[in-house]
Image: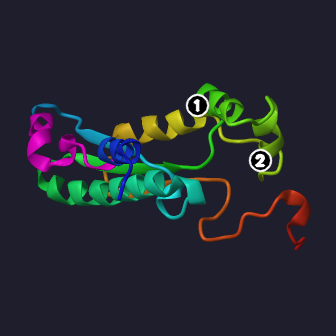
């Protein structure tokens, strides 16, 4: 049984009414029609304490693909981005709230291939591309924005085998 706060996460993260094709028909009055959903790599598997969040993101991925199919002849493009860990003010505040030191994200990010977590601007650039005419030829795409290949193991740099 879902706790009320878990149900709220799921309801607003996955099954809002705007995901129903009839509720987005108003988009057809515009020339450039793009719906871009932001989910998370947690859609595939999240930490044990993120089961409801991860499930909601997985539902959003599936809903995005189905919405793209339902709206294809209306020429409404639908994309879903699954970003990994992003260094934001909100993420830093949450990490502090749960007891991590202020430099926690910097230390963790230092173990990633880029030596840092992703920045919001990097995600924004992908969003701008998908909203542009340059991406007009495709829809229903789910894009993982992560420094690690999904399905691969996360290994801190110092434990990664050297080729």
What residue range appears in magenta?
A: 14-28
Q: Can residue 139 be seen in this view?
A: no
Q: Residues within 10 Å of mark 2 (few under 14, many from 20)?
A: few
Which structural element holds mark 2?
loop
| Residue bearing the label numbered 2 | 114
Q: Earlier in the sequence, mark 2 or mark 1?
A: 2
Q: Which quadrant of the structure image shows residue 65?
A: bottom left
Which structural element holds mark 1?
helix
Percent position (x, y) of residue 68?
24, 55
Left or right, residue 122 beside residue 126 = right
Quadrant of the rendering where the C terminus is positioned = bottom right
Percent position (x, y) of residue 54?
47, 56
State the residue in front, 52 or 76: 52
| Residue bearing the label numbered 1 | 121
Circle on res. 53? none
Q: How far apart are the alpha carbons under marks 2 and 1?
A: 15 Å
């Amino acid at each position: 049984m879902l706790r009320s706060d878990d149900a709220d996460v799921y309801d607003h993260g996955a099954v809002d009414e705007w995901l129903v094709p009839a509720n987005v028909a108003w988009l057809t009055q515009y020339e450039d029609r793009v719906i871009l959903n932001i989910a998370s790599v947690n859609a595939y598997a999240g930490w044990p304490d993120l089961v409801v969040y991860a499930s909601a993101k997985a539902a959003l991925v599936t809903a995005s693909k189905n919405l793209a199919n339902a709206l294809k002849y209306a020429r409404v493009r639908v994309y879903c981005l699954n970003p990994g860990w992003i260094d934001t003010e909100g993420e830093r505040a949450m990490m502090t709230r749960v007891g991590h030191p202020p430099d926690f994200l910097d230390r963790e990010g230092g173990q990633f291939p880029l030596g840092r977590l992703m920045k919001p601007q990097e995600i924004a650039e992908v969003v701008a591309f998908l909203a542009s005419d340059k991406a007009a030829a495709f829809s229903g795409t789910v894009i993982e924005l992560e420094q690690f290949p999904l399905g691969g193991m996360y290994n801190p740099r110092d434990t990664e085998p050297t080729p």
